[in-house]
Amino acid sequence: MPNARPRYSIVAPVFNEEATLPEFYRRTRAVMDQLDGDCELVLVFDGSQDRSPDIGRELRAQDPRVKCVIFSRNFGHQIAISAGIDYAEGDAVAIIDSDLQDPPEVILQLVAKWQDGYELVYAQRAKRRGETFFKLFTASAFYRLIRKLASIDIPPDTGDFRLIDRKIVLALRQIREHHRFMRGLSVWVGFKQTGIQYDRQERYAGTTQYPFRKMLKFATDAITGFSYVPLQLATTMGFWVSGLALIAIPVVAVLRIFLGNTFFHGQATTLISVLFLGGVQLIFLGILGEYLGRIYDEVKSRPLYIVTEAPPKPRAESKE
């Protein structure tokens, strides 16, 4: 019996993109028509409050290659990607945002690398058009920081725009942690990886769905998910402060003997020292709290997402 699965899947999270979705579909459909096999488009509606889900249903009605996964509420961009991977059936799965900052036409280049034998092909941003200096600076700083801190080698200037082989799809389906950094997880599972460069475009319409608050949470999830350095920093800082105190004790004693109270007068030095150490302790208590909070979320074992409308999930596969 022939394999009924499509050869390619394109997964696109959607959040309030009613102005962009028709054009995104038009350009993505043109790409699908050029691929050398059957293709499906999996649209994951992450609690959209506009007409995006209705537009998705209309597209599904006119094109059977379109699948709609509609969440009961907003669960977040990384969870939406995970849901798309759960429902994707292709031998190769391309992940792309639906705001058209990532050109769908680049998928053809990702597929070409996959056909060369690579199992993960990530799209690396050579240029980022239409973004503020602050966004460019913070993004650059984030990628370089996470590369320094993480226990895996995450390529710089890469977003979630990538293509993954079905081997990686099956591996990612086994990972059900809640605070997800998908571009890190796809690298963590291993396999043969490479990248291509492309120019990221301005948004086709609307405003960014990633304000600074979300960016900060995203960075926190990335760092705590792939690095113990913040915890180790607390220990290192403790040793340095303790060592400084051990050196300071005899120094202060000698200065008091020979200079009296003229050098250390009043309580200002003591208060500053106490406030500094108290601040350091609170910072590291906060870091511990971040890690403990993530452990707490995992222990609750809640589902990653809840859908109100979706096609049947692919049957479980152990081997390909």
Image (spheres, helix red, strand yellow):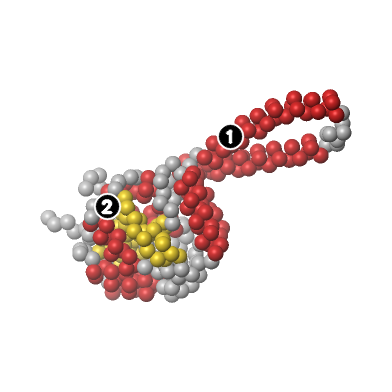
Residue 48 picture quarter: bottom left
Residue at the disc numbered 1: 236
Judging depth in this view, the residue of 3 and 279 nearest the camera is 279
Label 1 neighbour load within 10 Å: few <14, some 14-19, many 20+: few
Residue 178 picture location, percent across and down: 45, 48
Query: Which residue type carries mark 2?
Result: Tyr
Badge 2 element: loop
In the displayed structure, 126 sits above or below 179; it is: below
Residue at the (84%, 26%) spot, across then down: 258
Residue at the (84%, 24%) spot, across then down: 257
Which badge, 2 or 1, comes first in the chain's sequence?
A: 2
Question: Is any atom of residue 84 visible in this view?
Answer: no
Judging depth in this view, the residue of 117 and 20 nearest the camera is 117
Residue 183 is marked as none
Residue 87 picture location, percent across and down: 32, 57
Question: Is any atom of residue 31 visible in this view?
Answer: yes
Residue 171 picture location, percent across and down: 32, 46
Q: CA distance from mark 2 to mark 1?
A: 40 Å
Label 2 neighbour load within 10 Å: few <14, some 14-19, many 20+: some
In the displayed structure, 27 sits above or below 140; it is: below
Residue at the (25%, 64%) spot, across then down: 39
Residue at the disc numbered 2: 118
Residue at the (40%, 51%) spot, across then down: 155
Badge 1 element: helix
Q: Quadrant of the N terminus?
A: bottom left
Q: Residue furthest front?
A: 258
In the displayed structure, 143 sits above or below 130; it is: above
Judging depth in this view, the residue of 79 and 285 nearest the camera is 285
Query: Which residue type carries mark 1?
Result: Thr
